[in-house]
Image (cartoon, grey):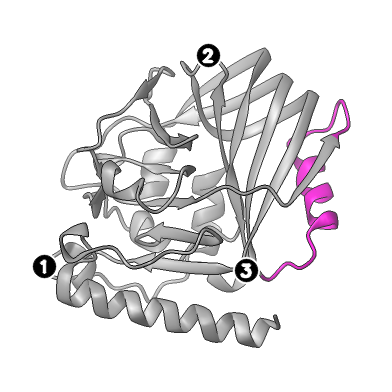
Amino acid sequence: MSIVNNLRKLSQVILICVLISALAGCSSDAGNPVIERETLTQVSTIGALMEGLYDGVITVGELKEYGDFGIGTFEGLDGEMVVLDGKCYQVKDGGIAYLVDDSLGVPFADVTYFDNDYSEKIAEGFTYEQVKTRLNEVFPTQNIFYAIKIEGTFTYMQTRSVPAQEKPYPSLTAVTANQVVFDFTEVTGSIVGFYCPKYVDGVGVAGFHLHFLTDSLDAGGHILNFTVKDATVNIDYTSEFYLILPGKGSDFYDTDFSDQYSDEIEEAES
């Protein structure tokens, strides 16, 4: 499929969701649309998160109707989300991962149903930057979405989380300036996340966005750096994109998104 067709399909999907959002807030009360397994479903936009829009758009229970694999955050920006094997975990600023209740609100997330399309052993000693370079080499195109799962042992893993925020919410860059960083050595677990093409910058996180969860399911966070010891990457090629926007009456309707966020997003994510 050409990039032109991809963009046309993307715009059609976004338009459909905007209409659904305007009528029903994209809630499950109106009935979820039929989502194909090869679809990345996103809740809200990274631009909205940059502006401090941390109120829940849907619940964790509703989110899991769109996929069994993904990442995001929680209402009030309360920690980092990892969805793995259909279960949703919350890594709070204390570094501990919790299995969360389906009633918790979700202001931003990306999920899909993970179906492996490609696997490769990662060379021992590869860093985060080297892994990203290698993945860009094996992607058949830079213009679709990829769900990425890396399972194994890591000589070093560095993650972060952030504390819950209270209204009036600060911007995301203000919050991550005070992020809590966790360092793991000789840790076994799963990297969960996505690659999004550059043309969605400001809607999604263009490039790589990865979170980590230990095999013991008790720690993790948003990945800042890592070094591989013994790991395998699995990639799900994902050519559909579905966007759920906040409903009428939310702060989203009154927010000015005219600013460009590329530099700010990079700062907040690193």
Residue at the outermost left position: 249
Q: Which comes sooner in the sequence, label 3 or label 1?
A: 3
Q: Secondary structure at mark 2?
A: loop
Which of labels 1 and 2 is toward the front?
A: 2
The residue where tag 3 is placed is 198
Instruction: Report the front residue among 221 and 31.
Output: 31
Quick check: is 31 in the magenta stretch?
Answer: no
Q: Quadrant of the N terminus?
A: bottom right
Distance from the alpha carbon under mark 3 to that under mark 1: 30 Å
Q: CA distance from mark 3 to mark 2?
A: 34 Å
Q: Secondary structure at mark 1?
A: loop
> What segment is highlighted magenta in the picture?
122-143
Q: Earlier in the sequence, mark 1 or mark 2?
A: 2
Q: Is residue 209 visible?
A: no
Q: Nearer the viewer, mark 3 or mark 2?
A: 2
For label 3, the crowd category at 10 Å Cα-Cα, with few meaning under 14, some 14 to 19 and many 20 or more, is some
Residue 249 shown left or right of residue 17 in the figure: left
Name the residue carrying label 1: 249
Res 216 label: 2
Q: Residue at x 54, y 86 (%)?
A: 8
What is the distance, in whole Å, between disc 1 and disc 2 at their CAs? 41 Å
Three-letter code for the amino acid on which mark 1 is drawn = Gly
* Circle 2 Cα neighbour tier, 10 Å, few/some/many (<14 / 14–19 / ≥20): few
Determine whether, in the image, residue 145 is placed left or right of residue 258. Answer: right
For the residue marked with disc 2, what is the amino acid?
Answer: Ser
- Residues 163 and 100: in front is 100
